[in-house]
Image (cartoon, grey):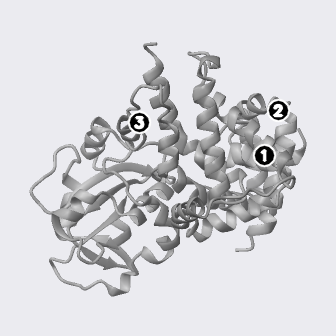
Amino acid sequence: MPSSGSFESELAALLPRLRRFAHALSRNGADADDLTQATAERALRNRTQWQPGTQLDSWLYRIMRNLWIDTVRARGRRDKVEAPAELAERLGEDSAIEASIDLKRMMDAMQRLPDEQREVVALILVEGFGYRETAELLNLPIGTVSSRLVRGRTALLAMVGES
Amino acid sequence: MTTDEKFFAWLDDELSESESAAMERKVAADPTLARLADEHRVLKARLNRAFDPIADAPLPQRLQAALRVPEAEVVDFGAAQRRRTARFSWSVPQWSAIAATLAVGILVGTMVPQRSTSPVAIEGGRVYAAAALDQALTSELASAPGNSDVRIGITFRDQSGAICRSFAQPAASGLACRDPKGWRVRGLFAAPEGQGGAYRMAAGMDPNLAALVDLTMAGEPFDAAQEKAAKARGWR
């Protein structure tokens, strides 16, 4: 498998961006890193399903988005129990990044958006995808993407935009 | 597309040239729309300022570990990181701490001493590079460092089209952008206590400076050829 090394290094190179997307979708840094980790693991497991020559980033974003939807659906059915040591380690890792007041405020505001608006706002305004790419990624008509984006960013501005 | 959708598509640069020009005129003629456009640009900038440091931060241990599956070949993570940070000529450590301190990091001009060797001078209430700093910004290339203790980092254009250059000295690092009067200093960040001299130079770009660069830069940083050409044109 001559290309496997490059698959992994490309995944590694894209992971920081995916982690940013995860933060835009998730309630907190721990959930975001869980989502990022699950995405990396699924991508490595299913690497043969990726068609070389197609956009690896779109493929990875789609995996993350689908995993996130699963998590959202499962939420409320169970509370995750964590070993104290693991939890402490995770809090240590997150504290630096969540010490950013801006990030905390923006993550909280994003959380108050309906899921279908949040993913569109995250892909276009945070991740910088175009409308068409986003429509393809989410398998939605472009008009739906556009109208969700208007509602999402308008709500977001009302929440954080008093300054 | 509704009128609203068209307005936002214009803001996101998603319209055709002719549609975009029409919307531009409409917004210019309507102060309410113009203000709304500004508010949404600020919102976008705030989102980017909040979330972008994550994409520039090192991955936590467990995510790096997730990439190392048992049967996989060795991950050339170093190479991936080098590619990722290639847009900066210095590596950028500790990104995660940036945003909280950004607001307090920018120097207020009134505290700058007025001496002929001072690296900055105040003109009309604005802080400009002077003496060795001015000289280095004007004449030095990142690809060919000179003898002064000023090191030039990256060169790029800001949203207004002005050329900006980041620089580092043993005691401080900062960002200056060219205007008709010279190199206007946009931000100056003192080196942390006990991190002067060579140690600091090796440690990489101050995270506050890196954040300021990220907020200021439009497009990509100049490569060596673009930097040289910009110098030849007098940084216009």
Question: Residue at 77% of width from left, 63% of height from top?
Answer: A157
Q: Determine the secondary structure under disc 3.
A: helix
Q: Residue at x 22, y 60 (%)?
A: B201
Q: Is residue A29 left or right of residue B232?
A: right
Residue at left offset 86%, top offset 49%: B4
Q: Disc 3 vs disc 2: which is toward the camera?
A: 3
Q: Looking at the picture, do discs 1 and 2 lie on one chain?
A: yes
What amino acid is found at the position of numbered circle 2 in the picture? Ile
Is residue B66 at least partly visible in the picture? yes
> Mark 2 or mark 1, which is nearer the start of the sequence?
1
Residue type, numbered disc 3: Ala
Q: CA distance from mark 3 to mark 2?
A: 33 Å
For residue A116, above or below residue A160: above
The residue carrying pointer 1 sits among few (fewer than 14), some (14 to 19) or many (20 or more) residues within 10 Å by Cα, namely some
On screen, residue B71 above or below B62: above
The residue wearing badge 3 is B80
- Three-letter code for the amino acid on which mark 1 is drawn: Thr
Looking at the rendered image, the quarter that the N terminus of chain B falls into is top right
Chain of the residue on which disc 1 is drawn: A
- Of B173 and A74, the residue lying toward us: A74
- Please tell me the numbered disc located at residue A142: 2
Q: Chain of mark 2?
A: A
Q: Which residue is mark 1?
A: A71
Residue B26: percent from left, percent from top:
79, 50
Give the x, y percent position of residue B130: 23, 70
In the image, B59: left or right of B194?
right
Please report the residue visible at 59 percent of the width from the left and 47 percent of the height from the top.
A19
Labels 3 and 1 share a subunit: no
Q: Which element type, helix, strand or loop, lies under badge 1? A: helix
